[in-house]
Amino acid sequence: MLSPIQKEIVELSGNLIVRASAGTGKTHTMVSKIEYDIAHCHTHKAVAAITFTIKAAAEIKDRLTIDTSNHFIGTNNSFAIEEIIKPFMKDVFGRAYKLDMSTDYSVKVKTFAEGLVKIKDEQILCSYANSKENFIFQLALEILQKSKACQLYLKAKYFKIYVDEYQDCDKDMHALFMYICESLNIDTFVVGDEKQSIYMWRGAYPKAFMSIWDREDFSKKFMRDNFRSCQQIQNYSNLLCDETRDLYKTVDDLSSVIVICTTRSNWVASVTQYLDTNKKCALLRYSKANAEAGAKALSDGDMEFTYIPQTPISEITTDAAWLYNAIAKYFILPKYSAYDFRDEIPNGVVGNKKILNYIKKSLSLLDECIKQEDISAFVKRVEVIADYLGYDTKEEHCKKVYETICDPKFHPAFKMDELKRIAITFHSSKGLEFEQVVLFVSDYKLSSEEDVYNHYVAATRAKTKLILVYVNGDWSAGQFAKNINNILGKSGLKMKDVATIVNCTECISD
């Protein structure tokens, strides 16, 4: 079922920008629109659904009820690399550049020229040392602007592109997507929420998203109704930002948002008495160290929390990253089969009985390597599988796969859906939801726009209960108290008007 605003979005043609606040059903709307647009397209052309993560792309694929084999559904980087750079690099830079290049963002360069040398001499697509610039997208735009063949290819193949989480785009991504829209006249659908821009530290440029909102050649829709969180949590999160402040609705029951003023030594006992043990809960902290320490403290307090770590393979950014994750999932997840492995092969590579049999045999051989604790044999076997599927590997990456599989402390990262109570960083929580969420206000001083956005994202993960922990004497918590009262004061409110405050109320309500 679609709400009236979702139905309007789905049926609109042409360029369209959607501002979608947290919990408004953004993914459902985007999937519905893709299906509608494809059904009403009377040409052979395809669509490109572009996301930031492999996980998000997989979710869109899973939700679509149509055959996606002729369409592109993948990440920003994979679109730039597979649809522009690899096919047309030679067209612009000459035959000295080989097309069988690999991607490794851990390799850093300072200039565009250095990046070209890396590709020419080592066949490596790398990244800039300066995270505010994006070599991949600068290169893609350079190729697209200069290659007539590339322009004709994209115009002939695609009638529409969809870009998810546009507020996380950097300046170079924005430049490429707007070139495709303006110069190639391919209809463009962008969806995002400037309030959920939490990656400015690595180059995200939310002003690019808002610049599209100001354009006359884009239709505009604003999805503001949060279907995830209860009204009180909606009230609290909406009051944080100017554009949603008018959605505030008075409620009599303030028990869904609780501010607990406590001490560093007593916070566990203070928090656990307000948690429903039967509902899923997440402790969200800014740093990995604090998330892990928080999980231990809560578990020592007789309420088991599992820390979700970053795995050794989580930061691998080569084009073989999907393979490493698929191998890990096969050995860690009981219900993950060779069929699931086959389905994760990008772009439907071969995907027949022959490839399935090969995968089954290969996974069996990997199992023997693990049982025999033979890491060298394991590495060689992964390399063979990768070569068969057309991917390059690195020995150190294959060793990280082995470590991920063999060390149980990393397994929770693959089993989050099965766990009732977890502790993670709030950056890792984006796109997730939990019945209950516990935050430490010291992680969000609210002294900058980025701080406010971070707090908004964290708070809107909660469905039925949000607990804010205020540790007495913490300077950062004091800054939060000062700034939240200033923010709420814009509506003539104080914290005591939107939350239940327990213990020393003077800390935050005055």
Image (spheres, helix red, strand yellow):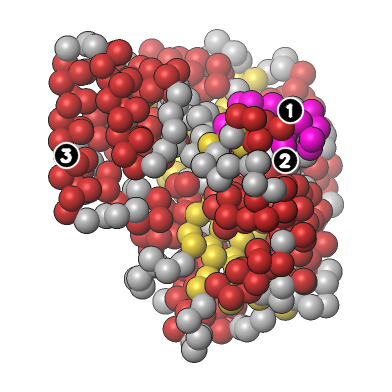
The amino acid sitting under disc 2 is Phe
The amino acid sitting under disc 3 is Lys
Q: Which residue is mark 3?
A: 360
Q: Which residue is mark 2?
A: 135
Residue 377 found in image quarter: top left
| Front position in the image: 332 or 143 | 143
Q: Between disc 3 and disc 1, whose residue precedes?
A: 1
Left or right: 229 with respect to 482?
Answer: left
Alpha carbon separation for disc pair 2 and 3: 38 Å
| Front position in the image: 113 or 21 | 113
- Residue 375 visible (yes or no): yes
Picture disc at residue 208: none
Identified at 72% across, 37% down, the residue is: 116
Q: Between disc 1 and disc 2, whose residue precedes?
A: 1
Alpha carbon separation for disc pair 3 and 1: 40 Å
Q: Vertical placement of 108 versus 491: above or below?
A: above
Q: Which residue is mark 1?
A: 109
Q: Secondary structure at mark 3?
A: helix
Q: Secondary structure at mark 2?
A: helix
Determine crowd level at label 1: few under 14, some 14-19, many 20+ residues with C-alpha closer than 10 A.
Answer: some
Magenta stretch in the rendered image: 103-116
| Front position in the image: 375 or 278 | 375
